[in-house]
Amino acid sequence: MHHHPEPEESPPERSAPVSALDPDLIRAYRSARYQVQASPQPFVLTVDTHNSRLAALIHTLPARTAALVTACNPEGVLLTLQENRVAMAQLRSELRGRCAGLLDAQNSGAAGDWTEPSLLALGLSREAACALGRRWRQNAILHAVADAVPRLVLLR
C-alpha cells in the first residue's frame, strides 16, 4: 500500500521566529568555522554540533555555559581593520569582569571568503550574551550550555 504525501501547506507564520536577516546569511552563519585559540591547540566550533573540547572547558565552570561574540562589522556592514580592532578591545574589556574566562577566536566563512575576530566568553549566560551582541549591533551570537552544542542565536 503506497502512502501518497499530502500536498505541503505553508506553515503558519508563528511557527518560526521571524528574522530580518537574509536566509542566505543565516545559512552562512550556520556553515561558518568558529576557531577557538585554546592551548595546547585550537579547536573549531560548528553550529549544532557537540564539541568535546568546549565540553571540557565549560564543565569546570559553576555556570556551564559559553558564548561566542564579536563586535566586528555591525549588522554585517564591513568596518575597517582599525575600527574592528577598537571595537574588539572595548568588547574584551567589557567581558573581562563578567565571565569566567576569555579565549580569542576567529570566525570565517565556509568558503574562506570572510573572516573576523571574536571571543569565546566562558560562563556567560545567554541573556548577557544576547544583550552584548545587540549592543554591538550584531546579527547573531553562538551560545552553548552544559551539552556543549553551540547554537546560533539570531538577534535581528
Image: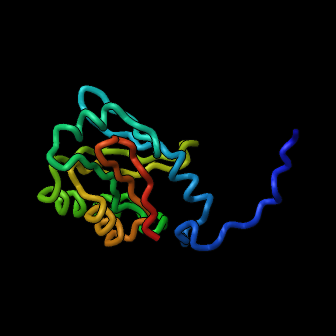
Compared across the picture, whether 5 is left or right of 96 comes to right
Tell me which residue sits at (51%, 53%) in the image.
29
- Does 31 sit left or right of 34 as displayed? right
In the displayed structure, 33 sits above or below 18; it is above
Asked whether 26 or 109 is in front, the reply is 26
Q: Nearer the viewer, residue 117 or 31?
A: 31
Tell me how many marks there are: 0
Write down the quadrant of residue 61 in the picture.
top left
Taking the view exactly as shown, the residue that stands out farthest to the left is 97
- Residue 78 in the figure: left or right of residue 10: left
Residue 72: percent from left, percent from top:
38, 61
Q: Is residue 148 left or right of residue 57?
A: right
**Residue appearing at x 56%, y 66% in the figure:** 16
Q: How is the image coloured?
A: rainbow
Seen in the picture, residue 131 relative to 39 is either above or below; the reply is below
What is the x, y in percent for residue 64?
23, 46
Where does residue 58 sit, x and y in percent of width and height?
A: 23, 41
Quarter that holds the N terminus: top right
Q: Residue at the front extreme?
A: 1
- In this rendering, the answer to whether 144 lies above or below 132 is above
In which quadrant of the rendered view does residue 135 lie? bottom left
Q: Residue at x 18, y 63 (%)?
A: 94
Which residue is drawn at the image coordinates 81% and 51% (left, top)?
Answer: 5
Q: Identify the image quadrant of residue 38.
A: top left
Along the line of sight, the residue nearer the viewer: 46 or 70:
46
Looking at the image, residue 114 lies above or below residue 135: above
Task: Give the percent coordinates (x, y) of residue 153.
Answer: 42, 59
